[in-house]
Amino acid sequence: MKNTSNKNIYIALISIHGLLRSQNLELGYDADTGGQIKYVVDLATSLSKAPNVERVDLVTRLIKDDNIEDDYSKSREYLTEKARIIRIKAGPEKYLPKEKIWNYLDLFSRNLLAWFESQDRMPDIIHSHYADSGYVASNISELTKIPFAHTGHSLGRNKQKHLISSGMHPKEIANLYNIDRRIKAEEDILSKAKITIASTQDEVLNQYKPYNFYKPDSIAIIAPGINVEEFKPSIPQSNLSETKKTILPFLTDPDKPIILTISRPDRRKNITTLIRAYAESEFLQNFANLVIVAGNRDDIRKLNNNAQSIWIEILLLIDYYNLYGKVAFPKQHNPKEISAFYRLAALSQGIFINPALTEPFGLTLLESSACGLPFVATNNGGPVDIVRECRSGLLVDPLKISEIQSASIKLLRNRELWLKYSLNGIKYVKEKYSWEAHVKKYLNLIYPILESKRNPIARYQDYDNGNHSRIGPADETGLTNTTRQ
């Protein structure tokens, strides 16, 4: 193994569940393909553009499944000249939700370690995303002494608390979400990670602090970045006709201001409360159209149970309140069209609403703000930081319909306030939330960890001496079929 300096860093990112590929991300495919997917792909791409980064590998699970596209069965795929997606076999080849992957994480660890050893060099640092990847990173770090960083994105204790408060029994939560195993893994990750990266101060206090191994000195806050070249305001001559065509069939008066919401169809995103807020306000119904972009669908009957139930509720509410001609809910969109939806709403002098029950960060708020579209958002989580830094939106209690209505009406009626928030968003997102700024902060955190690493020869001594006990045994789906190439 050759030694490395800060001039040729090799970073391995691990993000196991969901669907990762270089283009046309299937955001909203299910609960596992939300903002984290886009975050890790953008992070890998942006890190690879830094001159002192030699290589970035984004490691995920290899999937061969007739129900999804073949892209996810390729063992490697390039994001940039210096960044790749690496797919590792572990367990059944079919697509699995994250709760079902835990039984195969030891196998994933063994196969990934074998793949690392087959390369010309080992990573200088591993960065895991979410608890399942953190478990794997902890395994490999303990064997190889490669330091690892961790980003939780969401945490089990917080999820467990909200599920209990919603009325679910603890045993049901444990069975459905593997929550006890996840929380145990998260405690272990927090005790061993060299650094934990959070997006907001609220995330630190409300998600990380309840853990026994909460170590505030080892938690750094770096807000996610956005692509400011993709998310930007419209020029006066912008042609958004193709995007407008997707909503025209639904609307009687398509020239009204647009109230836009974009999320996956998940109960925590609270889309149905937004529909009720709109439906029960005479002003909002008369003044604006509601546009709901909630993933892609061909046939609601073929969606997973959670997404299917949300869409049934959406359609029932539209029918109950007789909102035909006022609410658009397009079936399909390309991920690259998302920025066009924001711009279309901004040109109509509309607003964006994120009514989620909790929002760990709120990437859609940065995207809308960068496009000059003011927002109304939940007061739980990351939006608090975004409002403080960008001053481009209003916060509400997502369970109080009256607050959603009042904030929406305030922005739609007050054109001076709307313009102020629009200009603030364009200015401050570019200044404070670009990927370039994120990478600079990220690498400044990583450098001290790399400088304090043990000697590369000593790093692998425990592993070479046969200390493999950290990783459990493989089975017949395992190491003999590893992606060693």
Image (spheres, rainbow, N blue to C red):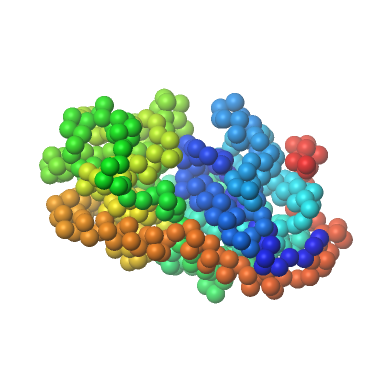
Viewer-closest of 143 and 177: 143
- Determine which quarter of the picture holds residue 145: bottom right
For this orientation, the residue located farthest to the front is 237
Residue at image point 31% right, 37% down: 240
Screen quadrant of the N terminus: bottom right
Q: In the rendering, at what x and y percent does residue 372 appear?
A: 29, 53
Q: Give the quarter of the figure containing the C terminus.
A: top right
Measured along the vertical axis of the image, is residue 222 above or below residue 99?
below
In the drawing, does residue 361 fall left or right of residue 347? right
The single residue placed furthest to the right in the displayed view is 465
In front of the other: 401 or 112: 112
Judged left or right of residue 382, residue 155 is: right
Q: Residue at x 43, y 67 (%)?
A: 201
**Residue 118 spot, x, y in % from top left:** 80, 49
- Residue 258 seen in render: yes
User: How many tags in the picture?
Assistant: 0
Q: Position of residue 120 (x, y in %)?
A: 79, 53
Residue 455, given in percent of the width and then of the height, sits at: 79, 70
Q: Is residue 357 visible?
A: no
Foreground residue, 465 or 288?
288
With 438 as the anchor, is 378 left or right in this view? left
Which residue is at a point 42% across and 54% down the rendered structure image?
228
